[in-house]
Image (cartoon, rainbow, N blue to C red):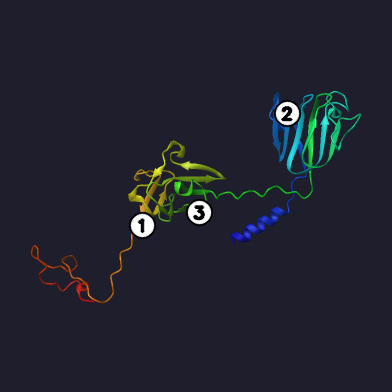
């Protein structure tokens, strides 16, 4: 079912085309004065080598450059300026870039072509734009979103390079609501933490890892274990948030048939000091020869 859902989601995603038109307004950029400027709006990055951004204008100083770039091809850029043609602040103040034209008596300058990055220099005067529209090529789609972790609790530590992955996701303890458990194999010296994930955001459970307050595994808690996590804390636990239960080693099976050794420990001998003599009691039957 999971594979079927993933295939359906991918097919649905592929049918959605990337927004062809991206509008960049002064309000999309953090206000700045007489400095380098950089901003990314809906996948289009704007960089100005030196300029100013106000609440109403994007200003490219004389002799400075504005560059627009995207991961997909740009096919059209339209500048709407505060002045006409080659007048100071108008679209005609840019240098001659192949594919760029402007209205001699209007406030609009347009570049058309196909490139992932296009640069313009305010050559004759400063250029002031109130809006920049960038058109991306047909059929381009954004990179598929990376799968995010499910909301829940995870185990992270030195044994998995502090990664947070579904391979180490806790499941709820059916015997104790609000408590979680996971079976793992630990080595002496391992360090670990519980992690909670909510909407993709990760948070350590208990003390943060970078404070060197990790839970450290000693020899007594190494091996095949079940780890219990209580996000609210359990005062009865040595580590408050984490409890490690070592799995019992199954007993060695007794041989079937043949002879067995009768000892005082398994057959209820009554013996004198230094001697293995006495009488065998009728019970248990396990003391009888196989």
Which marked residue is nearer to the observer: mark 3 or mark 2? 2
**Do the residues under discs 3 and 1 have CB atoms within 8 angstroms?**
no
Q: Residues within 10 Å of mark 3 (few under 14, many from 20)?
A: few
Residue 215 visible in the displayed image: yes
Horizontal and vertical percent position of residue 98: 85, 37
In the image, which disc is placed on residue 46?
Answer: none
- Residue extending farthest to the left is 272
The answer to which of marks 3 and 2 sits earlier in the sequence is 2
CA distance separating discs 2 and 1: 64 Å
Secondary element under disc 3, as helix, strand or loop, is: helix
Secondary element under disc 1, as helix, strand or loop, is: loop
Answer above or below: position of 161 versus 23: below
Which marked residue is nearer to the observer: mark 2 or mark 1? 2
In the image, which disc is placed on residue 167?
Answer: 3
Answer above or below: position of 134 versus 155: above
Q: Residues within 10 Å of mark 2 (few under 14, many from 20)?
A: some
Secondary element under disc 2, as helix, strand or loop, is: strand
Q: In the image, 110: left or right of 59? A: right
Residue 57 visible in the displayed image: no
The answer to which of marks 3 and 1 sits earlier in the sequence is 3
Horizontal and vertical percent position of residue 31: 69, 27
Q: In the image, 63: left or right of 161? A: right
CA distance separating discs 3 and 2: 47 Å
Q: In the image, 257: left or right of 198? A: left
- Residue extending farthest to the right is 105
In the image, which disc is placed on residue 247?
Answer: 1
Q: Residue placed at 50% from the left, 41% from the top?
A: 203
Q: Residue placed at 48% from the left, 52% from the top?
A: 168
**Mark 2 lies on residue:** 49
Horizontal and vertical percent position of residue 197: 52, 46
* Residue 258 occupies quadrant: bottom left
């Amino acid at each position: 079912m999971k594979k079927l859902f993933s295939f359906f989601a991918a097919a649905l995603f592929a049918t959605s085309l990337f927004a062809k038109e991206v509008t960049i307004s002064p309000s999309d950029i953090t206000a700045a004065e007489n400095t380098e400027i950089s901003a990314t709006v809906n996948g289009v990055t704007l960089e100005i080598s030196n300029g100013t951004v106000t609440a109403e204008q994007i200003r490219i100083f004389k002799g400075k450059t504005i560059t627009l770039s995207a991961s997909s091809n740009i096919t059209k850029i339209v500048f709407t300026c505060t002045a006409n043609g080659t007048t100071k602040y108008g679209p005609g103040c840019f240098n001659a870039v192949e594919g760029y034209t402007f209205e001699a008596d209007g406030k609009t300058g347009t570049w058309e072509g196909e490139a992932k990055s296009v640069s313009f220099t305010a050559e004759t005067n400063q250029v002031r734009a109130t809006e920049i529209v960038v058109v991306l090529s047909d059929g381009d789609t954004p990179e598929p979103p990376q799968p995010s972790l499910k909301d829940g609790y995870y185990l992270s530590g030195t044994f998995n390079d502090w990664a947070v992955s579904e391979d180490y996701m806790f499941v709820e303890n059916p015997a104790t609501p609000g408590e979680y458990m996971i079976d793992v194999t630990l080595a002496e010296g391992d360090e670990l933490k519980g992690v909670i994930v909510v909407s993709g955001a990760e948070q350590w459970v208990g003390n943060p890892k970078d404070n060197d307050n990790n839970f450290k595994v000693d020899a007594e808690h190494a091996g095949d274990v079940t780890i219990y996590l209580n996000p609210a804390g359990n005062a009865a636990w040595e580590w408050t948030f984490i409890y490690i239960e070592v799995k019992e080693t199954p007993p060695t099976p007794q041989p079937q048939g043949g002879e067995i050794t009768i000892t005082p420990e398994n057959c209820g001998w009554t013996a004198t000091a230094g001697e293995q003599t006495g009488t065998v009691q009728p019970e248990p039957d396990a003391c009888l020869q196989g």
